[in-house]
Image: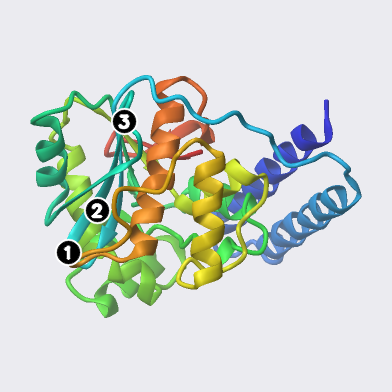
Amino acid sequence: MDIEAWRRRLRDFAGELLAAGESAPAGVGEVPAAYAEAARALARLDAALAASSSVPAPNLPPIEVAAPVLGVDGCRAGWVGAVLEPGAPRPRVVVAPTIAELVAMVRETLGIRVVGIDIPIGLPDKTIRRADQLARNALPGKSSSIFSTLTRAAYLAETRTEADAVNRGLVGQGVGAQAFALRDKIVEVDAWVRTRPMVTVLEVHPELSFATMTGAPIKASKKTDEGRAQRLSALADAGLPRPSVLEGQGYAADDVLDACAVAWTAARHAEGLAHPLPDPPEVFSDGIPAAIWA
């Protein structure tokens, strides 16, 4: 087994340890702390392997878009999408106020096969999602870009205070501002997915997609000139030229770049190249597979 394979196994195991510690029942003393310390030790070993390894970043061949796909990211206007289709010279940018309208608009003229969305899909009942933990482990130095998905009951609460009380009661974790700020969009996508749209729907995190493209997380912020330039370069190397537009009314350049990264993973999925975290995905009471694809 090569070094990268060992590192993937270490990250998965560390995520499982954290999940076990977070789900341990009350009254078990130092068990959760022991799990967390073991996970940190594994993370240190992973970092040591990375530092000592001469293995270069993955040299993935540029993606060949064989079937139409759509990558989607949230924005001020609602949702911005990057459409990839065979023979098209570059990603085409589309915008709509709701996810249902965005997908319907694209499907009017294009038989898209896969829709990737940068939003949690598959909401837990009373546990922490392994997808979030494993994605954080896979993004050293950028793990803060992955927030913990709240429980379904917490997202049904009307205020952050109410959601905080519900989530603490179920999993022992409070509700961060970022997690609750996305509440409306998460509930919207959840309701849409439950209508069983006639297309494969994936949860994709752009930072994980970029890390997969380049072999390591892009450390520069996507809201800086340096970060945008690095992401455009990564997309170009991955086979996606500069999109048709970079910003417009109600959406910014970082939204478009994220949508393109999500579309890249959707195209990989259509070709059987993408992989889920975890593998296999978790399934909660909603019956929706919960995994972040890359």
Residue topped by disc 1? 77
Residue 43, quarter of picture:
bottom right
Res 104 seen here = yes
Residue 226, quarter of picture:
bottom right
- Tell which tag, 3 or 1, sits nearer the viewer: 3
Res 25 seen here = no
- Is there a contact, CB below 8 Å, between mark 3 and mark 1? no
Viewer-proximal residue, 163 or 87? Answer: 87
- Is there a contact, CB below 8 Å, between mark 2 and mark 1? yes
Determine the CA span between mark 2 and mark 1: 8 Å
Residue topped by disc 2? 80
| Residue sitting at x 11%, y 29% | 109
Q: Is residue 273 left or right of residue 45?
A: left
Q: How many labels sit on residues?
A: 3
Residue 258, quarter of picture:
bottom left
Type of the residue with mark 3: Ala
First in residue order: circle 3 vs circle 1: 1
Q: Quadrant of the N terminus?
A: top right
Viewer-proximal residue, 61 or 99? Answer: 61
The label number, if any, that marks residue 53 in the structure image: none
Viewer-proximal residue, 89 or 110? Answer: 89
Mark 3: secondary structure: loop
Q: Position of residue 159 (x, y in %)?
A: 21, 76
